[in-house]
Image (cartoon, rainbow, N blue to C red):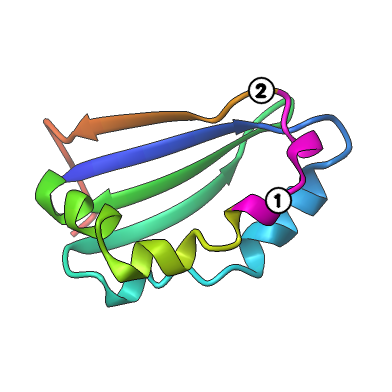
Amino acid sequence: MYITMNRFQIKEGRGAEFEEIWRTRESYLQEVPGFVAFHFLRGQEGEYISHTLWESKEAFDNWVGSEAFHKAHARAGQTPKDLFGGPARLSFYEVVLAQSKE
């Protein structure tokens, strides 16, 4: 398993606007082989995280090079720059140990 996390710092009072942008976007992730799950997380003090789970790093890399990726990010330039309190921070993780209820 492979996890990607993109962290966003959103200015005070702008969280609802940022959440609406994510709610109304089409991700096209269901079209991509190796995609497992997506979560959009709201933390404290304006922190948001886009979290995706993949079967492998190769599956994620294939997504980044896909038409689905380009379609999903086509509106990214339309997001108001003044929403952000700093640059997004992208992190990648290989899953070393996992547990689930099943």
Name which of mark 1 and mark 2 comes first in the sequence: 1
Q: Residue at x 28, y 51 (%)?
A: 53
83 on left or right of 101: right
* Residue kind at label 1, given as amino acid type: Thr
Which percent across, then down, holds residue 75? 60, 61
> From the viewer's perspective, is residue 93 above or below residue 62?
above
Which percent across, then down, holds residue 14? 84, 41
* Residue kind at label 2, given as amino acid type: Gly
- Quadrant of image for the C terminus: bottom left
Which percent across, then down, holds residue 47? 64, 31
Q: Which circle marks residue 46 in the picture? A: none
Which element type, helix, strand or loop, lies under badge 2?
loop
Which element type, helix, strand or loop, lies under badge 1?
loop
Q: Residue at x 59, y 68 (%)?
A: 25
Stretch in magenta: 77-85
Front-most of residues 80 and 6: 80
15 on left or right of 50: right
Which percent across, then down, holds residue 4? 33, 40
Q: Quadrant of residue 93?
A: top left
Front-most of residues 66 and 100: 66
Q: Which circle marks residue 86 in the picture? A: 2
> From the viewer's perspective, is residue 48 above or below residue 89?
below
> From the viewer's perspective, is residue 62 above or below residue 92?
below
